[in-house]
Amino acid sequence: MELDDDIVRAYGQPAVYRVQREVQTEEHFQTYFERKLSSTLCGEIQIPGVHQRLQCSFSWGRFRKIILKLFPVLNWLFSYRFREWLLRDIHAGLSVGMFQIPQGLLGVLLTRLPLPVINGFYSAFCCSMTYVIFGTSHHISIGSFSILNAMVANILKTLNFSEISSSNGSLANFSDPTFMKNYMEALTLTASTTFLTGIIQLLLGCFCLGFVTTYLPKTLIDAYLTAAALHVIVSQFTFIFGIMIDFHKGPLDIFYNLFHYFLVLPKANATSILLFLVCVGMLRVSKYIKITYKHNPIAFPMELLLIITVTIISNCIHLHAESSKVVLSMIPHRFLPPTPPDLSNLNKIVFHAFSLAIVSYFLLVFVGKRYASLHNYNIASNQELIAVGLCNISSSFFKSFAVSCALSGTVIQEKTGGRTQLAAAIGASIMLVFVLKLRYFFQALPNGVLAAIVVVNMLPFLEKFLDIPTLWRQDKYHLVIWLVTFAAVLCLGLDVGLAISMGFTFFVITVRSHRMKMVVLGQIPNMNIYRSLSVYRAAMEIEGVKIFQCCSSISFANMKHFKNYLLRKMDMKAVPLDENEMRALISVSLSDTAVQGKDLKCACVCDPPEPAPRIPYTEKLVKRHHTDSGSSSSSVNLVHWSKYGDRPSSRTLSVGTAQAQSASPGLKTGLETEKSQDEGRGACLSSPSAIDDSSVLLHQEEQKTRLLCPVHTIILDFSMVQFVDLQASDLLRQIFYMFHNIGITVLIASCHFSVIAIFEKNDFFDSCITKERFFLTLHDAVLAALEKHQRQEELELASRPTEREFAEEAFAEQQKERSLLLEKNKDFSSVKSSENEFLHDEPVSVISGSTQNEVEPSSLQQYDTPGLQLDLQHTGWEERWKYTSNP
């Protein structure tokens, strides 16, 4: 390759290059160029003969890599920037820790299960510290999630446990022995469910099944989090209105709960609603107050300020608003010692635990991926499974609920400037210290304040509704995924909705990846660049060559579309071979010709059965029938190329009806000609010239269509094809043979070596379809096709007789035919004498060429006698006379 010397090396001006080389096929390239690595493309794998002893060695680098993978905390701990990150993490830790205190106190009201208060906070602290060590996300705040707690409460209905409070606000009687027995059984069942959830997640992580999240698009994650945020907001209506309802469980539960809230809305607490609105207004105003630290903006800690301020006020003044003080005072136990979970009832909860494990993990990964993309780092899906599994196992010892990502805590930790999991560790420590020392101080905090913080922090997830118009303009498939995911999760819940959305997404991905897209390419003039004819006006189709670009992989799902597109663009269609043609094709495919002639064959049943013969194709190509042609709808136009007897400058495409072909007794099918031509050559089909010899002119309703540019080569651009499965390989092989059977060569360009390896494994190549048909580039294939076609035309012109030679040959044939006629009609002496006079004068008219057609018809009329007509009724005579009358 060399560049032109006269090119101006100015900025922005494209360079010009010249390449001079031979046309390269895969066969030639693999023969003359060796590969560095052994491959299935070049025969057997070469194994070096050097014998080495097996040695076990210890590598500090690999040990360090394994330790860092198991304990991700070491990745940021050893590279921690104290001057830049410490104050930001402390700020975020204070906000998150203060928010987790009222959140843990109010969790009882949503689940209606009075867990011991200290147990819940100990569980939150242990889970947070476990995730700090094993988690890979820098912004996740681990903790209880209200929707997961509601799912656990639904499981508890199997024990007929009476809830702590009903819709009218009455409290349960803890002094009742039966109630206390059911209460302890409910705590045991909760611990068992949480433990089994953690075990399932841990096993999934050890088997590296977290890769499933790799195939989930961002649109599904956004829609899932948006629907989950709406579920959280609706669950906060209990705190906003200060009323309690009987929560509906099952499909459309969010709409049933909304309806029940509206029914009891007249009983709402006005103070709670007012506090909620005031806090929402202050939180929205604080959004526009920014603190800049080290040139990085940090959100104003309004959540921290509200919790501390309103807690102090509520302890000094009775606000007549609902709080957690009354409910927590009724719980009989403040702390239960950690105990191993009961494993006797695992068979009852295994399906519920699996559902909790999936929802807990996907919620954690979805939120982690969202903030990882915002801050330009990656999370490990399998490690996240292990981390959340260990968190749930540790939570089960404190008889607590299954944990996952706390949405509100994560949003607060990220927007207040948290950079690492040190913020989560600081927040968990502050939460535990304040609960142990100042627990009663925070019990007076009104529930409406916490609801305002939760609702405002859910608004960033609802902003994804604004992306719908963008998705409508960019990719409607992703818009459909977004809408289906959102509707499924909103109406059917986080577990069932997740399963439906994942199934639908995988279906859409499968359809899109297997959807066949093909374009017809043309050449940009004076360049080796080929582009779509429908897109670029400058692209021009090459004479006699059709170029098709396949823009996807070929599999059983789209191979029919691939075939139909080719045939439609070539104005052809495929019809199945009849029984006789199939029998003849099988006989050609048999390798043992000696056995073919035997009608009876005896063999031992102990011998292995002979393999079935490989049939190269089961269909043949015919011309498409157009309704405006005037022929009957049942007729099928056959296609063949006529090379002899026409002008060198043009070719003739002879088209006739199927009825005429079947009526002609002298017609030979291409299959019979193929059989005669292929003896000794195996399964390879006949050459185009052999096919042309078998074609005949049809006498009934015969039509001739002049084509300015008949197609002689089809080139398939496989530069974008990644794989071809077994069924598609067989179909592609049949396409090669079907087009070869009508004189059209099929070539493949830019095929990846992995696809060629697949062809080799599937026995795609044979004596007819070789790697000589595969070219390295599209331009190589075009040059080879044009060169081969030009060489064939030159050979045809050299072997084609001149007009004088053709006339002399026709005259000799006429003399032979007429001499046979005269021998059969010796009784007609007058006819014989006139025939001798005609034969004596005939050469002059034939040599002149111009008077031949005028003399011959009048002379032939003399022999229209009754006796002669009887002899001419034979089909052989009919063909010879027609040939004589139409030279």
Image (cartoon, grey):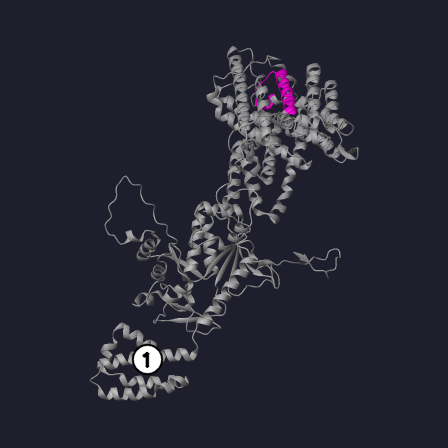
**Chain part drawn in magenta:** 108-133
872 or 574: which is nearer to us? 872
Does residue 116 lie above or below 301 as drawn? above
685 or 280: which is nearer to us? 685
784 displayed left or right of 682: right
Residue 723 visible, this orientation: no
Residue 84 visible, this orientation: yes
Does residue 714 lie above or below 106 as drawn? below
What residue does disc 1 label?
Answer: 814
* Quadrant housing the C terminus: bottom left
Question: Which amino acid lies under the numbered mark 1 shown in the image of this protein?
Answer: Gln
126 part of magenta stretch: yes
* Residue 1: % across, % down: 65, 56
* Residue 352: % across, % down: 50, 26
301 displayed left or right of 738: right
Main secondary structure type of the part rendered in magenta = helix
329 displayed left or right of 604: right
194 or 551: which is nearer to us? 551
Instruction: Identify the residue at image location x=53%, y=11%.
Output: 176
